Structure formats: C-alpha cells, structure tokens
Amino acid sequence: MPEKAGRGRTTRLTVLRTEWLTPHLVRIVAGGPELAEFTPNAYSDQYVKIIFRRPGVDYPEPFDMASAREQLPREQWPVLRTYTVRRCTDDELVLDFVYHGEEGLAGPWAAGLKPGDEVLFLGPGGAYAPDQAADWHLLVGDEAALPAIAAALERVPAGVPAWAFVEVAGPDEELPLDTGDATTVRWLHRGTGDTLPAAVRALDLPTGRGQVFVHGEAGMVKELRGHLFGTLGLDRDQVSISGYWRRGMDDEAFRVAKRAEREAEENGAA
C-alpha cells in the first residue's frame, strides 16, 4: 500500500556535504543522530516532505511540525516540498535538487546549503518499486523524476528488459546511471523536438506483463496517460503516473491547480 509523508514525525538532520552533479542538479548529503530513528520504506520512489519555516514566524522549539500545526494558524504553517530520497544508509540520507537559478523555494535553498546547516522533513512516503516478476519495465520522466528513475533502475532484475527515457536541458545534464545488462537509457534534450511522448509511442514494447513509471511535467504525463491506458490498454496496477509540475506555473500555482482538479474529480464522482 502507498505510504504518505505529509504528517507524522519530524526528523532533524544536519548537512554533511553538498555536490553539484550537473550544472543544474545539486546533491545534499545529510546525517545526524535522528537518522537512526528514520525508517526507510520499500519503495524506489521513497520521498520526504522538506519543511521550510516561513520568515518572521516564531515556531515552537525544539521544532515539531505537529506542534506548529496545533499552535499556529494555517497561514503560518511551514511550507512543504516533496523530494525523492536518492539513497539512505545508516549514516547518510541523500537528496538531489534541480536548481533553476533563484526562482522557486527548494532549489535556491539547496544550492546555498553548507555543512552544518539544518534539514527538517516529514516522512517517508512512497508508492512504487519495480515488480520483480514483471516481464519488462518502462521508466519515463524529466529532471524532477530522475532520482526516482535512477533508484528504480538499480532494482530491475538482471536480464529483464528495461527502457528509461529521461528529458534534460542538454548533454551536460546527463548522469551515469547504474543499470542492468538489458537496460536501455535514452537521454532527450529539451527544445530539440525530441519529446518523451514521441519516444514512448515509437517504442516497440515486448510481450508479457510490464510495469511503467511516468512522472514529470503535467502536460507530458497527461499525453502519455492516454497512450498507456488507451492505445496500449495497460491495467491501472501496471502504471505509476503523476505530474510533478506544470509548465508556466510555479510550485504554489501548480499545487492550487492540482488541488482544484482533485476536488472537481471527487465532486464528479460523488
């Protein structure tokens, strides 16, 4: 069953080091005593909700999200942003952040972190991991989905065919990925006319029961949703699909739009 990370225990870690993997992807490695109380789940898209305090608000100390929600009005609650756990060991939690310059909240924050800085989060949550019994795997996404795709590829069984299509800004945003001998990774560069939906539609998938992971920009996800469920006729339980962001919208606008869409769907089903 999927696990959600929006509530529950607040974990406080300390930045151990940072590393720029590409010009627009920064890795944060955090650790500390509270990591021993963090229990990873079984999902390759395991994620946490990073907690950002609002400027000018006095929060209860030691900080706890549950206490903040109980004691403060909603407009003063900290802001949450969702990020996939790239890796977790007994000593380190690894998170990768896409950096788009000084726009947004999480990217500039991650780019400015230094060893010793605090990282607060809730979680973990998650819903997807490669099915070890699947006959083939397809993973599709952009930079926002790359940590989850990379983690999933490490779990695809040897000899099982897998395809990963990842859209990035250009060649310098590509990363080496740990893959099996039957995995094909194709990098698509944004703005060249080579799109994720076109790449997936051109793929000749093998027979057998496969598993699909499609996450990233909402327009791309919507286009592929029709192909996967309509053209290919895949069952819902074969596909993990979600829009992480929408072109032309910042995080807050996208969250509002997504919430409105969800409420409209629920009202329509009522």
Image (cartoon, rainbow, N blue to C red):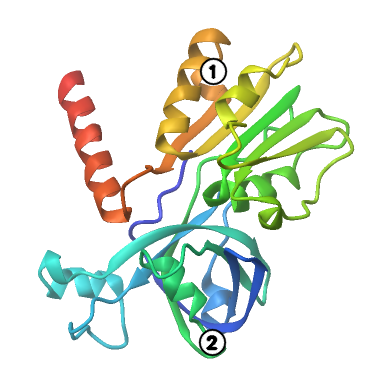
How would you rate the neighbour count of disc 2 (Cα within 10 Å): few for under 14, some for 14-19, many for 20 or more? some
For residue 228, the mark is 1
Q: How many neighbours does mark 1 have within 10 angstroms: few (below 14), some (14-19), or many (20 or more)?
A: many
Where residue 22 appears, as percent x and y from the top left, is: 66, 64
- Type of residue at label 1? Leu
Picture residue at 15% right of the left edge, 25% below the top = 267
Residue 114 has which mark? 2
Looking at the image, residue 37 sits to the left or right of residue 265; the answer is: right
Mark 1 and mark 2: Cα distance apart in space: 43 Å
Q: Taking 94 as reference, is 135 above or below it?
A: above
Of all residues, the one furthest to the left in this rendering is 73
Residue visible at 64% across and 35% down in the picture: 139
Q: Are marks 1 and 2 in contact (CB under 8 Å)?
A: no
Q: Is residue 166 above or below residue 230?
A: below
Q: Residue at x 76, y 14 (%)?
A: 206
Residue depicted at 21% across the width and 74% down the height: 68
The number of discs equals 2
State left or right for residue 253 relative to residue 42. left
